[in-house]
Image (tube, rainbow, N blue to C red):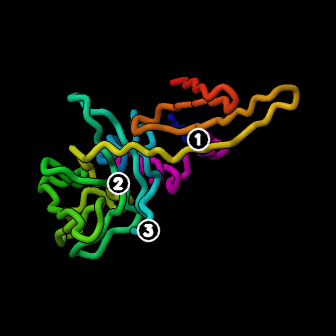
Amino acid sequence: MNSWILINVGTTKDGRIVPIFEDRLRSLGQWLNVNGAAIYGTSPWVYQNDTVTKHVWYTSKKNSQGSLDVFAILLHWPDPGKFYLSSPTPTQNTTVTLLGYDTPIKWTASAAHAQGITVLIPAIPFNKMPCNYAWVLKMQNLVLTIINKCIQFKHNCIFSNYSYVYEIFFNYENILHVCVSTLYLHRTMCFF
């Protein structure tokens, strides 16, 4: 679930960091100061990226109330107006905020689909932008989505009359479930 990043910054022969590398490291630190909530202590969400809107990636984390916060990382700033996220399913209590920006972001539920939200992005002056790249929307109080997409494969034993079916899937909290079914005995064992 957790990821690592290795950043190699070589020094000059007298032990100094080249100014361009120092600038990149400071920019990374400034971005993490604003958007670190979408990185530190997070797990993948049930959807890795948005399938309709390109360059949107998701992470998630349980908040202090025990519910799930979902973060949408936008690699391209959308034009002022609106854009559609196909993966989240809102409730009446759903809130959307842009990390580092004080005003809540307005949204509407998708009228054409069972899930998805249309996010209404205000025209934010450049000097009020929370960062210069990879902006993060924090969504709270979404419908918990359970993905029952199973990886299923069958194994026939050579030396017996048993046939096994294995089902492997993850639930909304990314907990691995493995179920083994024997077709001969019609029994199922699940490991959670």
Mark 2 / mark 3, whichever is N-terminal: 3
**Mark 1 or 3, closer to the camera:** 3
Q: Are marks 1 and 2 in contact (CB under 8 Å)?
A: no
Residue at 16% from the left image edge and 59% from the top image edge: 105
Q: Nearer the viewer, residue 118 or 99?
A: 118
Mark 1 / mark 2, whichever is N-terminal: 1
**Snapshot quadrant of residue 5:** top right
Which span of residues is magenta-colored? Answer: 9-30
Q: Going by the image, does 131 lie left or right of 24?
A: left
Label 3 secondary element: loop
Label 2 secondary element: strand
Q: Nearer the viewer, residue 24 or 159?
A: 159
Mark 1 / mark 3, whichever is N-terminal: 1
Residue to which mark 2 is pinned: 72
Residue to which mark 3 is pinned: 54
Q: Amino acid at mark 3?
A: Lys
Q: Amino acid at mark 1?
A: Leu
Residue to which mark 1 is pinned: 6
Q: Are marks 2 and 3 in contact (CB under 8 Å)?
A: no
Residue at 44% from the left image edge and 37% from the top image edge: 171
Measure the C-alpha gap from mark 2 to mark 3: 12 Å
